[in-house]
Image (cartoon, rainbow, N blue to C red):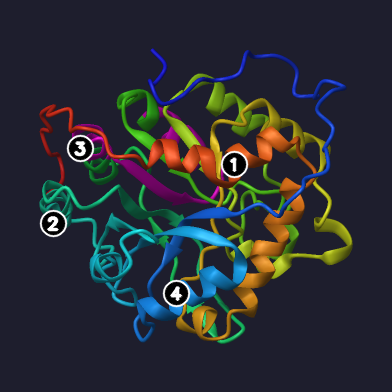
Amino acid sequence: APSPLSSPRPLGPLSPSPTSQATPRAAPLRFIDVHDHWPVGITATQVVAVLDQQGVSKVVLMQNGEGHQPPLPAADAFPDRIIPFAGFASQKHTRAEIESVERQLATGRYRGIGEVLSLHYEFSREGTSAPQLEIAADSPWVLDLLCLAAKWSVVLTIHMESTAETVPALARALRRYPNALVIWAHQTPLKTFGGQDAADARKGDPAQLASLLADNPNLYADIAPGYEGFFFDTSLDTRLPEAWRSVYERFSDRFVVGFDQPFAQGWQNPGGYARRVAWVRGWLSQLTASTAARIATENAERILSRRPPTGQACQLQSR
């Protein structure tokens, strides 16, 4: 049955109706950034200053390893601006990490869990680097997190690159826990498929994404540019391809935005953040005004609102 937080649009062809052309807006959109991080060495004040510069009203901060600070102190300093997600001191995929997440959720302070790195490609560019990390979306560790998301009525954000193996695993996990709300990160026209090189960029399949959204009312997606932003081409990527525009319109209540700055230099020199805001703002300007408003803020407000825990039992499988 559909999630009470989701009202999927009637299914139909991906091509939009003639009335779905973009319309002028009187004022620039403000955003809720649903995908971001608090790197070591950055203060909460610095984060909020960048938000103010870019018209971002709130930000989700996530921890997914030793390079990131736990977000709760930032949320304590700016409770109206910073939304904390329960996270991980490492990505070792242990039972101890699952138990740590549940202790965090039991405080009632967190609105989500993340970021889970199901398949994260290694990269080293422009003075930043990250390792390759991989765990199947239907592994016991991820299934335990899905169970906790359903139990505590919070969202789970997952970073998973698209391959012939990873996408079916995600579909299986979503079916296993239909009451767990999941945000699949980085679903943009830049999306890679099957590899991490420039040649793999722009190969993401919006029809495949549409099929997953249609089959799984608990699935959401963010349009945060990820590492594939290294491949952004101003001559190609400022215009939404029709297939991507259509899926955003068709599932306008299932997308949120994010700007994903996992490294300290992204907050210290916020030009990178500004570029990503500009890309997303440009893409949304090509959608109907109602769709743009949903994706910019309204969907995030809905799925990140506080809800009572369900209290369902979780039989943890992780070791």
Which badge, 2 or 1, comes first in the chain's sequence? 2
Report the residue at 40% width, 48% height from top. 157
Which residue bears the numbered disc 1? 295
Which residue bears the numbered disc 2? 100
Q: Which amino acid does label 4 sit on?
A: Val
Which badge, 4 or 1, comes first in the chain's sequence? 4
Report the residue at 54% width, 61% height from top. 56
Q: What element carries label 4?
A: helix
Which badge, 3 or 2, comes first in the chain's sequence? 2
Question: Where is 266 relative to 84, above or below?
Answer: below
Left or right, 91 with respect to 105, comes to right
Mark 4 to mark 1 CA distance (whole Å): 22 Å
Whether residues under marks 3 and 2 lie with C-beta atoms below 8 angstroms apart, the answer is no
Which residue bears the numbered disc 4? 47
Can you give x and y, in whole percent of width and height, for residue 43 in the image? Answer: 36, 82
Question: Where is 290 relative to 32, above or below?
Answer: above
